[in-house]
Amino acid sequence: MLRHIVMWKLKEPRRGADRAVNARRLKRSWSRARPCRASIKFEVALAQPGLEATYDVCCTPCSADKASLDAYQVIRSILRSSRSSPP
């Protein structure tokens, strides 16, 4: 199994919203890619109030093989290009 861990520390404010709102937006944008992730186990977690967290969002896609990892890379590039448009 191949695991790729991505963590974001968000800046405040961005696009007129605070970090918590932007973290939910980021999680939602990853959720929209769900139909494309046929063979990838995928988890996204947000920092929780009252717990120590250095990062606001953590994404952990797991791939069974190289082909699944390649599919994830395509999804990641699509999401990266969608960041330039408003949420």
Image (cartoon, grey):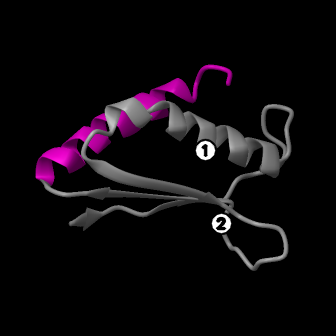
Residue 33's image quarter? Answer: top left
Q: Is residue 10 above or below residue 22?
A: below
Q: Residue at x 39, y 39 (%)?
A: 76
Residue found at x 71% / y 44%: 24
Callout 1 amino acid:
Lys
Image x and y of residue 20, in percent: 80, 50
Callout in the foreground (1, 2): 1
Residue 55 tag number: 2
Is residue 69 in the magenta section? yes
Q: Main secondary structure of the magenta part?
A: helix
Q: Which residues are magenta?
A: 66-87
Residue 26, position as x, y percentages in the image: 62, 42
- The answer for how far apart the CA atoms under marks 1 and 2 are is 13 Å
Q: Residues within 10 Å of mark 2 (few under 14, many from 20)?
A: few
Outermost residue to the bottom: 52
In the rendered view of the protein, which quadrant contains the N terminus? bottom left
Residue 58 found in image quarter:
bottom right
Amino acid at dot 2: Tyr
Closer to the chain start, of discs 1 and 2, is 1
Residue located at (41% from left, 52% from top): 42
